[in-house]
Every structure is written in structure tokens, then in C-alpha cells.
Image (cartoon, rainbow, N blue to C red):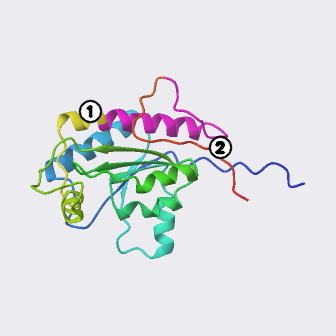
Amino acid sequence: NLGPPPILPAPPFAVAFVDRKTPRRQFYPRSRIAFLKLLSDLCAQNNIPFHIISYEGLEFDNQMATASTAGLLVGIHGANFVNSIFAAPGAALFEVFPHRYVRSYYLGGSNAGLRYSSWECRTGKNYRCNYEQDVACRLRYRDSNLRLTPDDLKGIKLQLQSAINYLRLVSASDTLPLRDPPGATSGGYEVQLPRIALI
């Protein structure tokens, strides 16, 4: 008899903005400033540490270690989130998508115990091409820079606060909750699993 599986430690009570160094799929400068200010202010109001991370130029073992420094990883959709597989069990992931380009590649992380949520920018350049049938057209949307409106910032703020509430709850508990805390607003797709080791 092996007994019950061990309880894993809670994810770090910290938020990290996963920065992108590529020239495509970036926030426009004013949107970047507004987004980082929103994130920084939310973290200060919630008394949660905040830092910016980047995986570019890091050796693999440093990428793994860096991914585990925060319980909430936040950023623009892209391959920079592949390292979320090294996040602590029970961590949360929040990604921002360009206008008209939403893909659920990292939703699968929810099945590994990550709380997942996302936001699609409400505005952006509309290209004259068939988005549904033309792959090149979809890629133009995917690689677009992101401009955040006041409505985007309001929606993002609600979802980030929900993710912070979740992280606070997880950090104070021995097991992961199966639902968001009462009164928390959630958006996007979410799945929470018990915090147990896989055998």
C-alpha cells in the first residue's frame, strides 16, 4: 500500500510578466505602459510581489527555474508560454491575444493543474482577407501588435484580480480549489485539479 499521494507545495505568491523580445506581437508602447502599470498597481494593492521575466538567451535549466518563480504568469500569447509546463502545480496562466486571433494551445495546461484564463483585444487592424479560410490571413492577425482600449484594460483588470484571488486562496491552502473563490469574476477557460503528485 503506497498510501495517499503527497501534497505538493503551493505555487509562489508572486506575479511575473513574461516579456517577449521579438519585434512582432508586442503591445504598442502606450498599451505596454498601461498594461504594466495596471499589473503593477494590482500587485501593489494585493501585496503580491511582481517582476518581469524573459526566457530569451537563458539556458534550458535557467528557463525551468525562471518559470517556477511566480504563481501567476502573465503575458502576450506566444511560444514564451511553453515554459509554463515548468510552473508550480496550481499556478495560473493569463494570456492576452491579438484582435481576431485566439488559440487555446495553453488551455491544455489546465489539465496539468494550471488555472488558465485569457483576453482577446477588442480592437485591431482589420485585414482584407478571408480569416476563416486563409492561413496567411490568420497569421497576419496572430503577428499583429496589440493596442489596448479602456474596455480591454477594465476586462483584463477583472480577470487578473480573479487570478490573484485564486493564487491567494491556493497559497493559503493545502489543496487546490475546484472553483474560484466566492465573488470572484472569472473569464476564459479554467480547470482546477487537486494538488497531488502524479504517480
In the picture, the disc for residue 59 is none
In the picture, the disc for residue 154 is 1
List x then y, in percent, for residue 77: 33, 56
Residue type pointed to by label 1: Lys
Q: Is residue 179 magenta?
A: yes
List x then y, in percent, for residue 122: 21, 41
> Spatial distance from mark 1 to mark 2, Cα to Cα?
31 Å
Residue shown at the point (60%, 36%) measured from the top left: 177
List x then y, in percent, for residue 101: 26, 52
Q: Quick one: quadrant of the N terminus?
A: bottom right
Residue shown at the point (55%, 33%) measured from the top left: 179
Q: Is residue 162 left or right of residue 151?
A: right
Q: Secondary structure at mark 2?
A: loop
Picture quadrant where residue 158 is located = top left
Q: Is residue 123 magenta?
A: no
Residue furthest to the left: 128
Q: Using a 10 Å C-alpha cutoff, classify the residue at mark 2 as few (fewer than 14 neighbours), some (14 to 19) or many (20 or more).
A: some
Q: Nearer the viewer, residue 141 or 154?
A: 141
Q: Which residues are magenta?
A: 156-182
Residue type pointed to by label 2: Pro
Of the two numbered discs 1 and 2 on the same chain, state the one appearing first in sequence: 1
List x then y, in percent, for residue 24: 20, 64
Picture quadrant where residue 157 is located = top left
Are dots 1 and 2 in contact, CB under 8 Å? no
Residue furthest to the top: 183
Residue 47 shows in the view = no
Q: Is residue 182 left or right of residue 76?
A: right
Residue 93 shows in the view = yes
Q: Quick one: quadrant of the C terminus?
A: bottom right
Residue furthest to the front: 133
According to the picture, the residue beneath numbered tag 2 turns out to be: 194
Q: Secondary structure at mark 1?
A: helix
